[in-house]
Amino acid sequence: MKPIELDLLLELQLAPGITARVVTADSMTVAHVHLQKGAILAEHKHINEQVVNVIEGELELTVNGEPHRLTPGKVMVLPGNVPHSGRAITDVRIIDVFHPVREDFRQTSFAGYKD
C-alpha cells in the first residue's frame, strides 16, 4: 500500500467550472472537488449516501428544495436518493465522501449525473 498523490490523478469535469480528483476504496469513494465562483451543480440524486465537507470557500447546497450555506467547519450528510444541487458563492474546495462506491467516478471521464 502506497500513498496516493492527488495531483497525479486524472481531473474529472463534473460540470462547467467544477472538477474533481477521485479516490476509490473497496466500499467508498472520496472526491476532492473544486468549484469556481458562480459554478452551478444542477439538481440530481444518486443511490449513494454523501457527506459534504467544505474545506475552503462558501457553497449554497440546496437539499430537497431547502438552501443551506456551507462554509469550512460545516458538514452536510445526505441520505441516498435525496435531490440536491449546489452553487459556489466563492471559489470552493470540498471533500465529498460517498458510500457505496460511486461507479460513475471510476471512469476516465464523467458523463453527467443521472437519477
Image (cartoon, grey):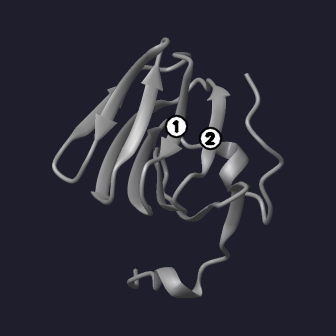
Q: Nearer the viewer, residue 37 or 20?
A: 37
In this view, 58 is above or below 43: below
- For residue 86, the mark is 1
Horizontally, residue 20 falls left or right of residue 93, namely right
Q: In the figure, 46 relative to 9: above or below?
A: above
Picture coordinates of residue 7 (x, y %)?
A: 52, 86
- Residue 10 falls in which quadrant of the image? bottom right
Dot 1, how many residues are within 10 Å of its Cα: few (below 14), some (14-19), or many (20+)? many
Residue depicted at 45% across the width and 20% down the height: 63
Q: CA distance from mark 1 to mark 2?
A: 5 Å
Question: Which element type, helix, strand or loop, lies under badge 1?
Answer: strand
In depth, the one of 89 and 16 nearer the eye is: 89
Residue 72 higher or lower than 83, as above or below: below
In this view, the residue in front, 60 or 113, is 60
The residue that label 2 is drawn on is 41
Kindly identify the residue that appears in the image at 62 percent across and 43 percent down: 40
Amino acid type shown at disc 1: Gly
Image quarter of the N terminus? bottom left
Q: Outermost residue toward the left? A: 73
Which of the labelled discs sits on residue 35, or is there none?
none
Residue in the image at 60% along x and 79% along y: 9
Dividing the image into 4 quarters, which one contains the C terminus? top right
The answer to whether mark 1 and mark 2 are in CB contact below 8 A is: yes
Q: Position of residue 57 (x, y in %)?
A: 33, 59
Amino acid type of the residue tagged 2 in the rendering? Leu
Q: Position of residue 58 (x, y in %)?
A: 34, 50
